[in-house]
C-alpha cells in the first residue's frame, strides 16, 4: 500500500518540517538568505542581459590570482579551501554580504564509506545506491560521473572533518517524499550548514589564503583566443577586473532569473522563489555568451514542488497537502491527468505531470481535509485563515461543488463530469483510469468543498551547461574550454537531467562538495 500522509497535530509538525527542510537539502529558503545588496545588484543586471559582453572601460581596481571562484556557497567554499590547500592564490566573488549562500540551510551531506560510518558500524553497498539512483533517473544520469560522486562521497566527509566541519550523527534520510533507506546522511552540527559547515569552511578558506570580495557580482569572462583569463565584476565602487589562470563558476544556478526560466518553458508568474535571490544564472550566461559553452538548459532539472497559497506563515501546510493523497487533480480543461499520490515516494516528481499543462488544480472536501488533520482545531483554523486571505487568488471554498469552477475559470460541465467520474471510481474502489491505491480513493461529497490552483515553489536549478567528469566546461564540440570549470548545481547536468530524483538524501550537497574540490583540483592541474 502506498504511503498516505496523516496530519494529526504531531504528524503534521513532522511532515511540515520535512516538507520545508528536505527541499532545503539542496539549498536554503529565501528567508535564510544573507545580505541583499548583492542580490539587488544582480537583479538589476538581469534586465540588461545580452548576447554579447564587452570589457568595461571604467575599471576601478585590478586583482591578480591563480583561481577566481564565483560564489561562496557550499561548492564555492569547498573549492576555495581545496584551491588554497593546493597552493593557489584564490579570490572568491560573492554577491551577498557574507559566505554561505544556500549552504546555510542545508542539513547535511550524503556519504558512503566515511570514518563516521565505520565508527558506527554502518556499511552501505555502493552498487545498491547506484542502482537505485540510476533507475530513479530513468538512466538519464551519467553512470561513471555518478559513480565518481558515490566513490568520493565518504572520503569527502573525512576531508571536511579535517577542515573543521562538524557532524553530529549519521542516519537514514527516509522521510516523507524522500525515498532513501540508506544510512548515509551525515547531519551537520545543529542540523544546519550555518552552524556545522559555513563558519568552519569560511575560516579554513581564509586560513589557506583565499580572499573574499563581498557584494560583488561577476559580469563577464575575460577570454583571449578561446582561453578564459579572468572575470570582469562589479561592486558598489564600480567595475573591477580579476586576472586569473582559471575560473570556477559556483554561483548557484538560475532559479531567480525570469528570462532563463521563460527560455526553459516556465511562466514566472506561476513561480514562487524559495531559494536564493542571487541565483540569477550569471555564471551560466557568461559561460555560454563569452566562452561558447554548450547550452544544456533544455535538460536542466529543478528542486521544485507544487504549492498553493502563501509560503509564510503557512507554507508548510500547503506544501504537505500538495504532495497528493486523497485529492483530485485536474488541468485547465478540468480533466484528471494522474495518480495524485505520486509524490509520496519522491516529492520532486509531483511537478512533472503538472508541467504538461497551462494550469493545474486540486479538488477536495472538508471531510478529506479533516481526515488528514485528525480534526485538529488549530490546523483547521490555520487552513481557514489561509483560505480567507487567499493572497494569490488560488484557493476557493464553496458549499456546492458546482459553484467552485467559475472562481478559477474552469468549464463547469467538464469539471462536474471529472468529479463525478472520480467519485464513481472511488465508490468502486478501483481506479481504472490511473491505478491509484484504493485506500486513497475517497469520494468528494461532504461540503464545504475546495478548489486550489497550483503554483511552483522553486528552490534551485541543476545544470545548464555541459561539463565533463573533471568539471571542465565544454564547448559545442564537447571539448574543454581552457580555464573554465563548473561547481555545485552548475555541474549537475551529468547527475540530474529534467528530474531531480532526491532519492539519495543529501546527494545534491555531496555533489556540491565533490564538484567544488574536483574543479579546484582540475584547475590546479591545468595551471601546473
Image (spheres, rainbow, N blue to C red):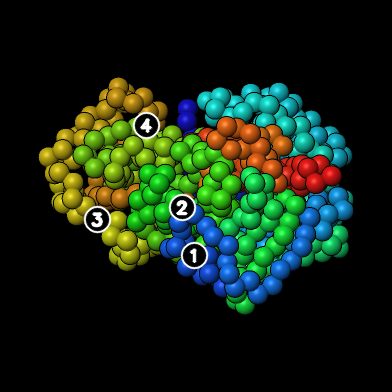
What is the CA distance from the residue labelled 3 to the residue labelled 2?
47 Å
What is the CA distance from the residue labelled 2 to the residue labelled 1?
13 Å
**Residue at 77% of width from left, 59% of height from top?**
65
Earlier in the chain: of badge 1 and badge 4, it is 1
Q: Which residue is mark 3?
A: 397
- Dot in front, 2 or 1: 2
Q: Residues within 10 Å of mark 1 (few under 14, many from 20)?
A: some
Give how far across and how far down residue 495 sits, in percent.
60, 35
The correct choice, above or below, for 318 with respect to 3 in the image is below
What is the CA distance from the residue labelled 2 to the residue labelled 4?
43 Å
Q: Which residue is mark 1?
A: 45
In-image side of 207 versus 344 (left or right): right
Circle 1: element type: helix
- Dot in front, 3 or 2: 2
In-image side of 371 versus 472 (left or right): left
Residue 138 in sight from this viewpoint: yes
Q: Residues within 10 Å of mark 2 (few under 14, many from 20)?
A: few
- Dot in front, 2 or 4: 2
Residue 154 occupies quadrant:
top right
Earlier in the chain: of badge 2 and badge 4, it is 2
Q: Which residue is mark 2?
A: 51
Earlier in the chain: of badge 1 and badge 3, it is 1
Earlier in the chain: of badge 4 and badge 3, it is 4
Of 382 and 132, the residue lying toward us: 132
Give how far across and how far down residue 24 sits, in percent.
58, 52
In-image side of 143 versus 88 (left or right): left
**Residue at 36% of width from left, 40% of height from top?**
354
Q: Residues within 10 Å of mark 4 (few under 14, many from 20)?
A: many
- Dot in front, 1 or 3: 1
Q: Which residue is mark 4?
A: 339
Earlier in the chain: of badge 3 and badge 2, it is 2
Circle 4: element type: loop
Amino acid at each position: 500500500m502506498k504511503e498516505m500522509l496523516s496530519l494529526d497535530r504531531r504528524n503534521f509538525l513532522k511532515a511540515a518540517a520535512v516538507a520545508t527542510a528536505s527541499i532545503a537539502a539542496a539549498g536554503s529558503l529565501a528567508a535564510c538568505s544573507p545580505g541583499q545588496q548583492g542580490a539587488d545588484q544582480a537583479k538589476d543586471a538581469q534586465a540588461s542581459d545580452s548576447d554579447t559582453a564587452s570589457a568595461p572601460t571604467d575599471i576601478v581596481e585590478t586583482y591578480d590570482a591563480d583561481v577566481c571562484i564565483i560564489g561562496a556557497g557550499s561548492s564555492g567554499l569547498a573549492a576555495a579551501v581545496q584551491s588554497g590547500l593546493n597552493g593557489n592564490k584564490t579570490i572568491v566573488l560573492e554577491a551577498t554580504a557574507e559566505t554561505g549562500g544556500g549552504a546555510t540551510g542545508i542539513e547535511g551531506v550524503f556519504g558512503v564509506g566515511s570514518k563516521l560510518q565505520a565508527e558506527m558500524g554502518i556499511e552501505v553497498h555502493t552498487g545498491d545506491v547506484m542502482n537505485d539512483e540510476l533507475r530513479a533517473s530513468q538512466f538519464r544520469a551519467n553512470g561513471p560521473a555518478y559513480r565518481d560522486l558515490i566513490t568520493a562521497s565518504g572520503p569527502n566527509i573525512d576531508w571536511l572533518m579535517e577542515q573543521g566541519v562538524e557532524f553530529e550523527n549519521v542516519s537514514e534520510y527516509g522521510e516523507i517524499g524522500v525515498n532513501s533507506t540508506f544510512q548515509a546522511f551525515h547531519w551537520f552540527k545543529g542540523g544546519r550548514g550555518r552552524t556545522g559547515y559555513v563558519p568552519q569552511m569560511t575560516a579554513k578558506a581564509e586560513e589557506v589564503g583565499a580572499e573574499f570580495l563581498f557584494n560583488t557580482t561577476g559580469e563577464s569572462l575575460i577570454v583571449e583566443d578561446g582561453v578564459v583569463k579572468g572575470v570582469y565584476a562589479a561592486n558598489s565602487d564600480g567595475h573591477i577586473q580579476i586576472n586569473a589562470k582559471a575560473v570556477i563558476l559556483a554561483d548557484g544556478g538560475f532559479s531567480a532569473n525570469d528570462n532563463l526560466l521563460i527560455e526553459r518553458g516556465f511562466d514566472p508568474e506561476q513561480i514562487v522563489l524559495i531559494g536564493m535571490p542571487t541565483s540569477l544564472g550569471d555564471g551560466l550566461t557568461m559561460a555560454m555568451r563569452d566562452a561558447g559553452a554548450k547550452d544544456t538548459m533544455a535538460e536542466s532539472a529543478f528542486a521544485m514542488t507544487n504549492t498553493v497559497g502563501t509560503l509564510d506563515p503557512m507554507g508548510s501546510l500547503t506544501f504537505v497537502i500538495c504532495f497528493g493523497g486523497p485529492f483530485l487533480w485536474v488541468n485547465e480543461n478540468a480533466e484528471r491527468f494522474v495518480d495524485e499520490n505520486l509524490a509520496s515516494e519522491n516529492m520532486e516528481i509531483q511537478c512533472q505531470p503538472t508541467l504538461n499543462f497551462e494550469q493545474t488544480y486540486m479538488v477536495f472536501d472538508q471531510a478529506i481535509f479533516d481526515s488528514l488533520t485528525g480534526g485538529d482545531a488549530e490546523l483547521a483554523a490555520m487552513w481557514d485563515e489561509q483560505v480567507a486571505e487567499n493572497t494569490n487568488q488560488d484557493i476557493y471554498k464553496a458549499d456546492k461543488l458546482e459553484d467552485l469552477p467559475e472562481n478559477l475559470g474552469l468549464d463547469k460541465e467538464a469539471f462536474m463530469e471529472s468529479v463525478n467520474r472520480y467519485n464513481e471510481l472511488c465508490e468502486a474502489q478501483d481506479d481504472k483510469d490511473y491505478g491509484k491505491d484504493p485506500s486513497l480513493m475517497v469520494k468528494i461529497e461532504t461540503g464545504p468543498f475546495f478548489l486550489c490552483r497550483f503554483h511552483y515553489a522553486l528552490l534551485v536549478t541543476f545544470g545548464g551547461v555541459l561539463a565533463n567528469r573533471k568539471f571542465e566546461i565544454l564547448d559545442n564540440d564537447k571539448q574543454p574550454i581552457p580555464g573554465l570549470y563548473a561547481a555545485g548545481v552548475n555541474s549537475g547536468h551529468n547527475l540530474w537531467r529534467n528530474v531531480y530524483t532526491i532519492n539519495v538524501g543529501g546527494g545534491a550537497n555531496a555533489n556540491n562538495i565533490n564538484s567544488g574540490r574536483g574543479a579546484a583540483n582540475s584547475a590546479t592541474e591545468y595551471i601546473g
